[in-house]
Image (cartoon, rainbow, N blue to C red):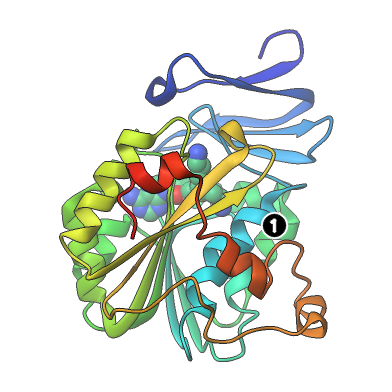
Amino acid sequence: LENGWFREECDLWSGYSMCLKVDEVLYHEKSKFQDIMVFKSKRFGNVLVLDGLVQCSEKDEFAYQEMIANIPLYSHPSPENVLIIGGGDGGVVREVVKHPSVKKVVLCEIDEEVCNVSKKYLPGMAVGLSHPKLELCIADGVEYLEKCEGKFDVIITDSTDPVGPAEGLFELRFYKLIHKALKPDGIMCNQGENIWLDKELIQDVLKKCRAVFPCVSYANCTLATYACGQIGLVLCSNTMRDLSKPVRTLTEDEVEANDYKYYNSAVHSASFVLPNFAHKAFGLP
Ligand code: AAT
């Protein structure tokens, strides 16, 4: 904090930083796994920060949470069992349980304190944490997956960046475990970092994914409070399919009824269209 501004900086993207004006720091403690801070911001509501990096703000979280949940779920004809790794704030669960076909959601979050803090300061997201379809599991995502085989229709990794507890979620072994934990027609969707700052990291992730899955794609999402106003999604499928074409499309009334503030069927397809430099760098077809 400098003169009432929070400044986000990260060794992964040295030379860039993003600032938000702080009204009040509401919480700041070290958990067993990371430094957790929540502050009330001037423009974006309450903001959750882990190890100095913004995880979500109340004003724009819908963009990322709707996209990371709905791109894989609307690409699947009938998702029933869903696993979320990370996402302890509950926002992704909130979106996943809107799908009537979903029978059960497991949330595997490493840090229970993230859930506790979210219940107190991010109630609009934490609603997901008390949903009857949810099984909450406090564990490391890699360790949880080791015990799973052919279980899930969709696996979503809503993880922090590969410094700290999420390092293992960017390794080849992790993608192999996801492949094993998915049903034969399952779909994976992972937090896919930023096309301006993390090009090499994304290339590395896509290379590892291509070694495991026959079908690998990348989608784009924009929002205000992540670095450079952009975050990507890495999508993989065990079967060849065009993930940019939702298999279930929505009418305007359905978009309204689901309270989607970002996602619709046109946005789904459009999010796979990338600027030339990214398209080329990621070797996409
Ligand atoms: N929806 C909020 C956005 C997040 S949250 C990421 C969550 O992943 C955190 O709660 C963190 O505790 C959890 N996590 C980290 N490592 C693991 C692990 N090994 N197993 C399970 N959960 C883990 C992500 C925002 C991305 C920001 C991009 N710059």
Element under disc 1: helix
Taking the spot 28% from the left edge, 81% from the top edge, the residue there is 239
Question: Neighbour class for label 1 at 10 Å: few (<14), some, many (≥20)?
Answer: many
> Residue 96 at what x, y percent from top left?
57, 74
Q: Is residue 285 visible?
A: yes
Q: Amino acid at mark 1?
A: Phe
Location of residue 141 in the rendering, given as x and y in whole percent from the top left corner: 32, 58
For image coordinates 28% across by 65% down, the residue present is: 144
Quadrant location of the C terminus in the rendered image? bottom left
Q: How many marks?
A: 1
Q: Is residue 91 left or right of residue 157?
A: right
**Residue 113 seen in this snapshot:** no
Choose between 190 and 3: the one closer to the eye: 190
Horizontal side of residue 257 vs 19, given as left or right = right
Find disc 1 in the rendering and name its residue.
62
Beta carbon at label 1 within 8 Å of ligand 1: no
* Residue that sits furthest to the top in the current view: 3
Q: Looking at the picture, does residue 56 appear above or below residue 215?
A: above
Residue 276, above or below 199: below
x, y (%) of residue 81?
43, 84
Left or right of 274 in this view: 241: left
